[in-house]
Image: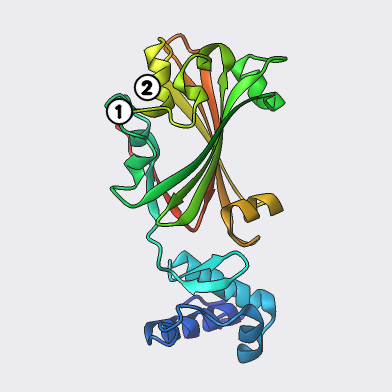
Amino acid sequence: MVKDPAQGKTPRYVEIADELRARIEAGEFAKTGKLPSERVLTEEYDAARNTVRDALQLLRVDDLIESRGGSGVYLRAFRRIQRDAVGRASREVWGSGRSIWSKDLHGRPRSENVKAFEADPPEHVARTLGVQGRKVWCRDKLYRVEGRIVMHSVAWYPADLAEGTAITEENTGPGGTYARLDEIGHGPARFSEEIEVRLPLSAESKTLGITMSTPIILIVRTAYDSEDRPVEVNEMKLDSDSYRLIYKFPS
């Protein structure tokens, strides 16, 4: 139990978290799978709403509960996706015709909503791809696992590479976009990923179906071919309640 070093006693939010944990373990919420609302909990525990929110956050960290946008707080039923950032993007995966997305799931039911279209890229994407003033091909994808929205990604590809390939179609075929790039001599030779964790914007919250207090994981991946030309910029927004990031690499 956490003690407040300044006062020598347990903070109120920790006490509330401990009491809620005991109620969860006793099966009090098992029938509906739903916890009381923050308003009800503030009344039950005679505490400020921020105190109750801090208590709930401790339970989220312990993977006991999860928030669902517009619905409330529930007992966690969804098993987090283990995202192996290094292994999933290897040539061994996409070169064998597998989807790097499926590499994370180990057979769990999944679906994708895909839109492919030509567009003017954001300035930072145009700079990275070296295509200022030109259109690119965009692939906008919403990912679901076991019916739950877990990620929204928007990827951009130089038009001179994408045109004439299945990158411009909803179904890119075995191995996905990396296999199609490889077929024209521009397969990924290396990647870089930048990661940021922040609270979602209103539109992001709505798209992912999460609350405004649920952090998102923003990953920007850039793929480079063997000549070190950037061939893809992919911005991925992950529901932090759905993922755990795993990094495995040699020493």
| Disc 2 from disc 1: Cα separation | 7 Å
Q: Quadrant of residue 116?
A: top right
Q: Quadrant of residue 80?
A: bottom left
Q: Where 2 falls versus 161 (above or below)?
A: below
Query: What amino acid does circle 2 point to?
Result: Ala
For label 1, the crowd category at 10 Å Cα-Cα, with few meaning under 14, some 14 to 19 and many 20 or more, is: some
What residue does disc 2 label?
A: 179
- Can residue 188 be seen in this snapshot? no
What residue does disc 1 label?
A: 97
Q: Quadrant of residue 160?
A: top right
Where disc 2 sits, the SS reads helix
- Which quadrant does the C terminus fall into? top left
Query: What amino acid does circle 1 point to?
Result: Gly
Q: Residue drawn 41% across and 23% down? A: 178
What label does residue 3 carry, if any?
A: none
Left or right: 23 in relation to 92: right
Q: Residue drawn 69% across and 28% down? A: 122
Residue 69 image offset from top left, x and y in percent = 60, 64
Where disc 1 sits, the SS reads loop
Q: Where 146 falls versus 190 (above or below)?
A: below
Q: Where 196 falls versus 3 (above or below)?
A: above
Q: Where 245 falls versus 46 (above or below)?
A: above
Residue 212 image offset from top left, x and y in percent = 65, 60
Q: Residue drawn 37% across and 60% down? A: 79
Foreground residue, 178 or 162?
162
